[in-house]
Image (spheres, rainbow, N blue to C red):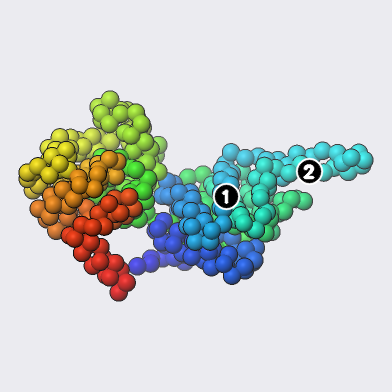
Amino acid sequence: MLSQSNGLVQLTVAQMVAQLSDAYSSLIKSSFPLYKFPSIMLWGPPGVGKSQGVRQIAAEIQQRTGKRVVVTDVRLLLFNPVDLRGIPTANAEKTLAVWLRPKIFDMDADESVINILFLDEITAAPQSVQAAAYQITLDRTVGEHKLPDNCIIIAAGNRVTDRSVAFNMPKALANRLCHIEIKGDAGSWHEWALQANVHPFVMGYLDYISSTLTLFDPVEDNLAFPTPRSWEMVSNILNSVSDNLTRVYPLIAGCIGTNTAGAFRTWCEIYQHIPPLDQIFEGKPCTPPDRPELLYATVAAMVDYARKSATETELVHSIDFACTMPMEFRFRLFHDYYRIRAVRQKLEKNSIFSQWVAFHEEENRV
C-alpha cells in the first residue's frame, strides 16, 4: 500500500527500484529519448537506502535491456563549483577561455551503454554547487559541457525536516523534477540483505525487532543511530573484523549508538542456544527451539549456512528439520532459500520445497 507525505507518494526502496527500473527499461526498449523523461529527485532521511537503490536500478536495467549500465556517483557535499564546471584555460589561439571537461562528463555515449548520473546530497551542497547541479538536472548541461543522450539523471537529498544539512528547493525548480519520498521498510531491506550477505546476527535481530531498522529522530542530537546504512556497517564489521560482540562492541556502538548496540549484543547471546547447525545439515536428530527469538535466530543462521557451504544433501536435511518448526518459521526459511538462486537450484528436486515454490508462485500471480 502506498502512503503520502507532503503531497508526495512514499515508496519503500524496493517499490522505488521496481517503479523506476520498469520505467527506464520501457523507455530504453522503445528508444524513447531519455532527456525527455524528467530527472528524478529522491527524498528521505539519512541512511534509508537511496544510494543503494540506485545501484539496484542499474543492475535491473542492465539485466532487462542487455545494455551495460555505468553509475557515476557524485557526492555533491564534497564538491566545489569548479569540480562540476571544469577548469578554465586558454584556447589554442590564446584569444578565448575554454573550460576543461570535468570527470563526471567523461561518459561513454555508445548506444550499447546507459549512464546513470547520481547526484547525491544535492540539498546539503553549498549554494554555488547546488546551482550547477540544478542546471545539470534541468538542462543536462553545465556551462559548455553537455551530458550524452544515453544518460539518466537521479538526484537525492535529505528533507529539511530531517534536520540534516539541507536547504529548501525553489518551487520553480521543484516543479520540473519528478519527486519520490523514500521510507524505511524492514521487508524490502530483508530482501536486499539476503543478496548482500548481511551477517546472520543482524538478519535475525532485525527480523525479530524490525522497528529498530531505522530509529532516526531529527529532534535528537545523536551522532550514531540505526538506519539501513548503519546496520550494513555493523554487518561488515561482524563479517570482516570479528563476530565476537564484546571485542567489536565499541565499533558497533559507533555505528548504531550505545542503546541499540547494547540491546543487540544481549540479543546475540541467544545464538549460543540454537540447535547446532552441523547436526541440522547432517540430518542428525535435533529439537527445534520453542521461543520465538530463538526461532528467528535459527532461521537466520540456517540461511547463512546454506548460502555459504551447504551441499544438496545437506539442504535436504535442513528442509526435513524445518518441517518440525512452526509453519511461520518454516515458510520464512523456505522464502529465504527461494530468494537465493544457488540454494533454490540445489533444491529443485526436493518435493517438499518444490510444492511450496509452486504454491508461492501461484499466490504471487493472483
354 on left or right of 283: right
Residue at the image position 12 percent from the left and 44 percent from the top: 283
Badge 2 or badge 1: first in the primary sequence: 1
Query: Quick check: 245 above or below 324?
Result: above
Query: Can you give x and y, in whole percent of width and height, for residue 323 in the image?
Result: 12, 55
Quadrant the N terminus occupies: bottom left
Q: Quadrant of residue 332?
A: bottom left
Q: Nearer the viewer, residue 46 or 362?
A: 362
Q: Are marks 2 and 1 in contact (CB under 8 Å)?
A: no
Query: Quick check: 68 above or below 264?
Result: below
Q: Find disc 1 in the rendering and name its residue.
A: 70
Quadrant the C terminus occupies: bottom left
Query: Disc 2 versus disc 1: distance between alpha carbons?
Result: 24 Å
Q: Nearer the viewer, residue 213 or 54?
A: 54
Question: Can residue 157 be seen here?
Answer: yes
Q: Nearer the viewer, residue 26 or 246?
A: 26
Q: Residues within 10 Å of mark 2 (few under 14, many from 20)?
A: some
Closer to the camera: disc 2 or disc 1?
A: 1
Query: Quick check: 6 above or below 236?
Result: below
Query: Can you give x and y, in whole percent of width and height, for residue 348 in the image?
Result: 26, 57
At label 1, which amino acid type do we have?
A: Val
253 on left or right of 93: left
109 on left or right of 125: right
Residue at the image position 20 percent from the left and 45 percent from the top: 314
Query: Can you give x and y, in whole percent of width and height, for residue 240 in the image?
Result: 36, 31
Q: Find disc 2 in the rendering and name its residue.
A: 99
Residue at the image position 58 percent from the left and 38 percent from the top: 78
158 on left or right of 297: right
Q: How many discs mark residues in the rendered view?
A: 2
Question: Can residue 128 be seen here?
Answer: no
Query: Can you give x and y, in whole percent of width and height, for residue 308 in the image?
Result: 29, 41
